[in-house]
Amino acid sequence: MIEMTVSGLAIDERTHTPVVLLKEKDGSRMLPIWIGPSEASAIAIVLAQREFQRPLTHDLLRTVIEGLNAKVPKIAIIDLQDKTYFARVFLEREKELLSIDARPSDCIALALRTRSPIFVKEELLRDEEEGGEVATQQSMEELQRALEDMDPEEFGKLWT
């Protein structure tokens, strides 16, 4: 497993779909993962260091985990089947370690909130030069501006 960081968010110009970009922590390999608008918003909120008066879904999940005296030691993106990535959230409580199936985007949003490391199975990575058809820097800046100006009640309407 290779540790990754969230490099940013982009819009795939071809499909107009949000993409979260993971970058190898100590290297140049990338993993673009196409995600939904709600998940992109959940990730963008943390990246932009925005806070809201009321907890959003991933904030609630973090609070529940903490309330159970558990922690998230890591999340892992472990497989790709039929163009769909599979991931696991690992929860640790006392001496017990649980592995829970989850969408990669939800895992990433939770990992950012809990400051947990993100791991990817090495076979899923590609070199930066191979890239994907991901948006330009201009599209990333447009997404960031749109998310910064958005009311939380509007999440999900950005790409409809």
Image: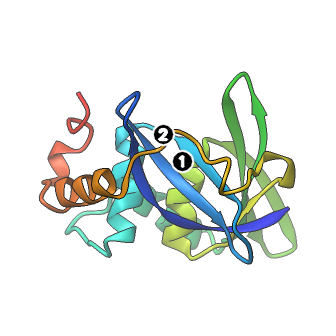
> Mark 2: few, some, or many residues within 10 Å (few <14, many ≥20)?
some
Please state the horizontal and vertical placement of residue 106, each as a whole percent of the image. Answer: 53, 49
Please state the horizontal and vertical placement of residue 95, each as a whole percent of the image. Answer: 87, 73
Picture quadrant where residue 141 is located: bottom left
Three-letter residue code for mark 2: Ile
Q: Which element type, helix, strand or loop, lies under badge 1?
A: helix
Q: Is residue 98 found left or right of 7 in the rendered image?
A: right
> Mark 1: few, some, or many residues within 10 Å (few <14, many ≥20)?
many
Q: Looking at the picture, does residue 129 appear above or below residue 133?
A: below
- Location of mark 1 (residue): 105
- Location of mark 2 (residue): 35
Three-letter residue code for mark 1: Ser
Q: Looking at the picture, does residue 116 appear above or below residue 144?
A: below
- Are the residues flagged by discs 2 and 1 in contact, CB closer than 8 Å? yes
Q: CA distance from mark 2 to mark 1?
A: 6 Å
**Depth check, front residue: 57 or 20:** 20
Q: Residue 159, labelled with which disc?
A: none
